[in-house]
Image: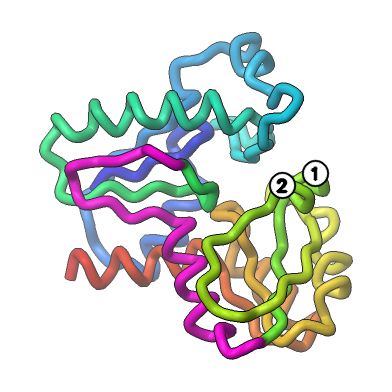
């Protein structure tokens, strides 16, 4: 398995918890920012008109990068991984990257999460979506198929300062989806307790899909 983060690998905050749901597998981790210096990473902040993506550096710091650069870098990495005989590539980001493809079987977190939400809420429910950044509330897009409506709130999974506040903002919805791979199971439980609503966790949805593919 190749697990790809748009930040830096290894993702010590992410893969160990996902392994609890995926079972035993041989995993190699790759990060789009792995070989970049701090100065180079700082220059990747989203330009005007670009969308912002949030990830984590190896030392635990949060980083915000532009989607246009990320898409180009990701396409190159996928081409490289296609030549390394992996059985499965797992993209650990809930951003949508048009035109990024792989010949290797690939699990795209965005598609898994959106399909899972539609399966539960497609009959006209109201879905609360938790995102890392306030600016992402203006940029958010979903490949929704059904007829559900969306309410947005923000809380960074890496600073962990607004999780309960965001949960309260979404408490009037029918269910909540924590739409970033950085959110943890512990955070999901806090949101469920605060909002009193069912909560879907992106990393758990993705791990469930992977578990079935490798069983």
Q: Nearer the viewer, residue 53 or 203?
A: 53
Find numbered disc 2 in the image and state the secondary structure of the residue it sits on. helix
Q: Residue at x 45, y 39 (%)?
A: 5
Q: Residue at x 50, y 36 (%)?
A: 6
Task: Give me the C-alpha separation between circle 1 and circle 2.
Answer: 7 Å
Q: Residue 85: which disc?
A: none
Image location of residue 63, percent across then percent down: 67, 32
Image location of residue 37, percent across then percent down: 56, 12
Image location of residue 113, percent across then percent down: 49, 66
Residue 13 visible, this orientation? no
Q: Residues within 10 Å of mark 1 (few under 14, many from 20)?
A: few
Residue at numbered disc 2: 139
Residue 190, compared with residue 74, is above or below; it is below
Residue 165, compared with residue 55, is above or below; it is below
Find numbered disc 1 in the image and state the secondary structure of the residue it sits on. loop
Residue 87 visible, this orientation? yes
Magenta-drawn stretch contains 114: yes
Q: Residue at x 24, y 26 (%)?
A: 80
Q: Which residues are magenta?
A: 98-124
Colour approach in the figure: rainbow
Q: Is residue 116 left or right of residue 139?
A: left
Image location of residue 157, percent across then percent down: 69, 52
Q: Nearer the viewer, residue 56 or 94?
A: 94
């Amino acid at each position: 398995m190749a697990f790809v983060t748009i930040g830096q690998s290894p993702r010590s905050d992410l893969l160990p918890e996902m392994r609890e749901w995926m079972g035993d597998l041989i995993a190699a981790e790759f990060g789009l920012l792995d070989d970049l210096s701090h100065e180079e990473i700082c220059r990747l902040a989203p330009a005007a008109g670009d969308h912002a993506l949030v990830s984590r550096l190896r030392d635990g710091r949060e980083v915000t990068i532009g989607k246009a650069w990320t898409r180009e870098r990701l396409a190159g990495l996928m081409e490289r991984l296609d030549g390394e005989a992996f059985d499965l590539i797992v993209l650990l980001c809930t951003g949508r990257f048009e035109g990024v493809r792989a010949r290797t079987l690939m699990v795209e977190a965005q598609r898994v999460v959106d399909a899972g939400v539609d399966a539960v809420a497609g009959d006209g429910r109201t879905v609360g979506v938790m995102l890392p950044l306030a600016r992402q509330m203006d940029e958010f897009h979903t490949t929704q198929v059904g007829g559900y409506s969306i309410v947005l709130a923000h809380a960074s999974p890496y600073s962990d300062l607004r999780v309960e506040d965001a949960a309260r903002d979404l408490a009037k919805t029918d269910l909540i989806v924590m739409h970033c791979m950085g959110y943890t199971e512990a955070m999901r439980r806090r949101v469920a307790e605060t909002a009193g609503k069912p909560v879907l966790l992106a990393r758990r949805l993705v791990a469930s899909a992977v578990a079935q593919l490798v069983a």
